[in-house]
């Protein structure tokens, strides 16, 4: 195109429009039909590192050779169809930087007084941070899916009689817990995208107001904060779910005295018991021996005792927890843990061993403690467990476990 033709379609120099170009937080440009820069703002020059003056009158092939083919194709399409082209993502590195950046671009025809297309307006918004947030969100989702897969593979840890039903509740519980932060993040991302499209359109029309700009910046700041908080919560939940998987080193088998091991557990919990002014008594018939799995046994006793401390005696009330261990027939041992705490209603008692059931979710409890106990007693120690309780009458949990535990499954 000759210089005289370029002057005929030169970008108009209205002061208000020039002010928008100079202050807009997104990149703006005006291209001639033969893809020469007739106007460009400083923000857009960051893509190629050439000054505003260095762009004017030059072709995109001269300024951004790596993007020239795509740009020429878009401009040609607009000239032929008269339709705008929106939502085109452009990737590249800024001169002097090693990090890849991303911009989303919108292309609209500029028409002359007789309706013919005399140029193309371009708006380019950098979305590098949003893309990074989306990658982090995908990473969190992938981690959640991996956690779900591990939980599914732990199917053999569920009691045989309720295996399929319990597994369904377990997976549903994980999905429910993870869905909240991930779903919120997706909602925030969608809202931010809608706001971006509206903002870009307003810029392309040349009607950007300062109030719109301030509103857009506030939305971006709020969305970034929500995304960071919810992704952190999803990561925290994933870490908590890992405890359901059983470590193979945890399955070492040996002979031990259940009374002695229980007293060791009780001693380790004394600092916590002291805070609540609780008394813990352990009674065990001398000479009892088990050939079983001490790791799972310790976890069962720890979970049951801590559950009593936290739930049976709320607000630090005083009370007593008793542990009784005795023989049950020739081959089994009975272990009973009772307290004189607040007790449970029939509804709470019925759901006590369900996965993700808790009355203290607002305090950070996830509700896996008694469910894990239930699984270990049935699946690892080869026993059975029961619970009885009533409001104001305390709670009693008792287990019947074999002295010689069944062999652990390797599957």
Image (cartoon, rainbow, N blue to C red):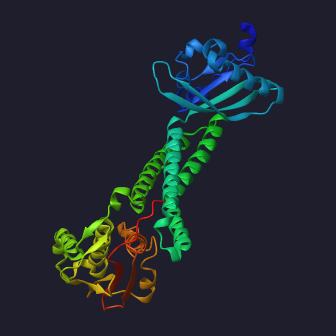
Foreground of the two, 250 or 227: 250
- Placement of 355 over or under 153, stated as above or below: below
- Can you give x and y, in whole percent of width and height, for residue 212 in the image? 56, 43
Q: Is residue 41 left or right of residue 282?
A: right
- Can you give x and y, in whole percent of width and height, for residue 236 in the image? 40, 55
Q: Is residue 180 visible?
A: no
Q: Residue at x 66, y 28 (%)?
A: 122
Q: Residue at x 57, y 33 (%)?
A: 125
- Placement of 217 over or under 286, stated as above or below: above
- Placement of 301 over or under 107, stated as above or below: below
Foreground of the two, 245 or 195: 245
Foreground of the two, 19 or 375: 375
- Can you give x and y, in whole percent of width and height, for residue 39 in the image? 63, 20
- Placement of 145 over or under 40, stated as above or below: below
Q: Is residue 140 visible?
A: yes
- Can you give x and y, in whole percent of width and height, for residue 174 in the image? 49, 63
Q: Quadrant of the N terminus?
A: top right
Check the image and name the residue furthest to the front.
Answer: 330
Q: How many badges with numbers are in the image?
A: 0
Instruction: Tell me where residue 241 sits by quadrant.
Output: bottom left
Q: Residue at x 57, y 39 (%)?
A: 209
Foreground of the two, 116 or 173: 173
Q: Is residue 153 left or right of residue 253?
A: right
Instruction: Tell me where residue 359 sits by quadrant.
Output: bottom left
Q: Is residue 31 left or right of residue 329?
A: right
């Amino acid at each position: 195109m000759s210089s005289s033709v370029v002057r005929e379609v030169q970008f108009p120099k209205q002061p208000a429009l020039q002010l928008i170009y100079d202050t807009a937080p997104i990149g703006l440009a005006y291209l001639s039909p033969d893809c020469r820069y007739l106007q460009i703002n400083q923000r857009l020059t960051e893509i190629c590192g050439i000054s505003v003056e260095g762009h004017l009158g030059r072709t995109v092939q001269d300024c951004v050779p790596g993007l020239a083919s795509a740009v020429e194709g878009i401009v040609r399409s607009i000239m032929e169809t008269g339709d705008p082209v929106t939502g085109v993502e452009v990737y590249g590195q800024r001169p002097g930087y090693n990090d890849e950046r991303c911009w989303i671009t919108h292309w609209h025809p500029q028409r002359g007084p007789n309706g013919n297309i005399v140029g193309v307006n371009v708006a380019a918004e950098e979305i590098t941070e949003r893309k990074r947030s989306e990658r982090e969100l995908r990473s969190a989702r992938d981690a959640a899916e991996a956690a779900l897969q591990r939980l599914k593979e732990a199917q053999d840890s569920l009691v045989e009689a309720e295996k399929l039903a319990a597994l369904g509740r377990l997976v549903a519980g994980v999905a429910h817990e993870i869905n909240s932060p991930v779903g919120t993040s997706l909602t925030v991302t969608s809202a931010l995208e809608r706001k971006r499209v509206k903002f870009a359109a307003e810029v392309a029309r040349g009607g950007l107001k300062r109030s719109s700009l301030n509103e857009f910046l506030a939305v971006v700041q709020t969305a970034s904060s929500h995304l960071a908080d919810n992704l952190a919560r999803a990561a925290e939940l994933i870490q908590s779910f890992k405890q359901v998987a059983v470590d193979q080193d945890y399955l070492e088998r040996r002979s031990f005295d259940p009374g002695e091991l229980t007293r060791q557990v009780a001693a380790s919990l004394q600092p916590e018991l002291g805070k609540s002014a609780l008394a813990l008594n352990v009674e065990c018939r001398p000479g009892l021996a088990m050939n079983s799995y001490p790791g799972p046994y310790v976890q069962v006793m720890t979970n049951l005792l801590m559950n009593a401390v936290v739930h049976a005696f709320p607000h630090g009330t005083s009370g007593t927890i008793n542990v009784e261990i005795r023989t049950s027939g020739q081959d089994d041992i009975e272990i009973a843990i009772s307290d004189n705490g607040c007790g449970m209603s029939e509804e709470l008692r019925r759901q006590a061993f369900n996965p993700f059931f808790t009355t203290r979710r607002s305090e950070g409890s996830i509700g896996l403690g008694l469910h894990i106990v239930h699984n270990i007693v049935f699946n690892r120690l080869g026993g059975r467990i029961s619970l009885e309780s009533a409001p104001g009458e305390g709670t009693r949990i008792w287990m019947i476990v074999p002295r010689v535990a069944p062999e652990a499954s390797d599957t």
